[in-house]
Image: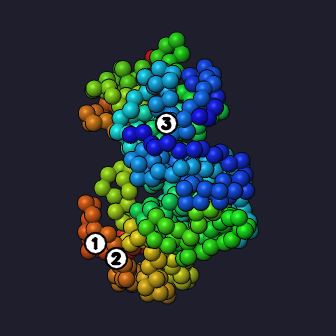
Amino acid sequence: MIPAQFDYVRAGSVDEAVSALAEHDEDAKVLAGGQSLIPLLRLRLAYPEVVVDVGRIAEMHGIRDDGSHLVIGAMTTHAEVITNELLRRHCGLIAEATETVADPAVRHRGTFGGSLAHADPAGDLPAVALALDAEFVIAGAGGRRTVSAADFFVDYLQTAIEPAEVLVEVRVPKLGDGWGYRYEKFQRVAQAWAIVGVAAAVRRSNGSIAEARIGLTNMGSTPIRASAVESALAGTGAGEVAAACEAAAEGTSPPSDLNGKADYRQHLARVLTRRAVTAAAGY
Amino acid sequence: MVKISITVDGERHEDEVEPRLLLVHYLRERLGKVGTVVGCDTSNCGACTVHLDGNSVKACSVLAVQADGGDVTTIEGLANGEWHPVQAAFKECHGLQCGYCTPGMIMAAVDLLANNPAPSEDEIREGLEGNLCRCTGYQNIVKAVQLAAEGGAR
């Protein structure tokens, strides 16, 4: 299918992007790598009057070290994320999850920020960002503001980004010594979306788990933090992981669709959380 | 209309295009590069895979305006007087049945080998996960990539 007609603005800077968005407000859509938006345009599920291309804004590319955090430009591609040495060293969970996103050709175009701003609950990166307490730097007419991951994901395909705003970069706290991580994704076939995914980061101390951060993919209309498991895991050893992970589906209302019913997804969440935590803890 | 300048298979083109024009349609309908085919139309199958600035992309999921200033290689630009080694390997191993997925499969395989010159069988299968062969002829496709990696095809 061929997209409906739209006007095209190629923004040269964040300010230009924000002005173009402010001018057209809800009739405009931001184009990043296009790997979600272009299929939506083709299927005419989206028909903006104006597309604002932010793909060439230099400031929005690349990954830099900011001491306690890594700062990932929203337009950094998945392929760049996977091969970035800084990221692999300090936020390896992001690299591991990104390797499971779509396929190599899509990862060459798709971007870290685009994927998060699209906020598909079956996407892999939102749960990772939530588990790692990432912070989202959003630019608008009034300047820039920072939103925590807990407040960023609002609903199905909805984030805290307003129509006349653009996501510039994402700040992710580095995982220091003692942290292990794992992204467990259950899918039917290669390159498919996650039926359920679990992002786990675990810090061990003196042979037991001192701290755990767990994000769930596709267990509701937004990524969900498995807080009950996180509390249950604190201070536990290898023998107690399975029991703690029984709480993984608590408070979730996952979708029922052709890939599985809600209760099946809740079962998967428990199993995948156990696997992810066990691997992350090195048990 | 938006003015774009784009190099395709070594030749530079200046054109005016509608913003909604997809790269794959630009290649096929404007430039006559019909070696690149449209398969699923929804970025699943990879039949339209080309290289943009040296990386594999699905040309049905890139706007022509996004490729402005870029360097595109299609299946038609791969051979340089003689078959590209991956093309030769697909011929040698009969890495095709109906042949519809072949242009995209070869472009994805060339990209895979550029990043990983000696892939394992698993790495080949994972590297080609974005390209579907509806004849399910994967066995010989994998063999062809292995042969090309070994430098066995001429």
Say whether marks 2 and 3 touch (CB < 8 Å): no
Write down the residue under mark 2: A253
The residue indicated by pointer 3 is B22
Residue marked by disc 1: A262
Q: CA distance from mark 2 to mark 1?
A: 7 Å
Q: Nearer the viewer, residue A47 or A121?
A: A47
The spot of residue A69 in percent (x, y) is: 68, 68
The chain identifier of the residue carrying mark 3 reads B
Q: Nearer the viewer, residue B62 or B85?
A: B62
Q: Position of residue A99 (x, y in %)?
A: 49, 53
Q: Residue at x 58, y 63 (%)?
A: A163
Assess whether mark 1 and mark 2 are in contact (beta carbons under 8 angstroms).
yes
Instruction: Determine the residue positioned at 61% across, 48% down.
Output: A53
Indicate the quadrant where residue B120 lies: top left
Q: Eyeballing the image, is B32 above or below B53?
A: above
Chain on which label 1 sits: A
Of helix, strand and loop, which one carries label 2?
loop
Q: Are discs 2 and 3 located on one and the same chain?
A: no
Colour mapping = rainbow
> Within the image, what quadrant is residue A114 found in?
bottom right
The subunit carrying tag 2 is A
Label 2 and label 1 in one chain: yes
What's the residue at 36%, 66% (across, down)?
A196
A141 shown above or below A54:
below
Occupied quadrant, residue B55: top right
Judged left or right of residue A125, residue A72 is right
Where residue B30 sits in the image (x, y, percent)?
50, 23
Q: Position of residue B26 (x, y in %)?
A: 50, 29
Q: Residue at x 40, y 29 (%)?
A: B37
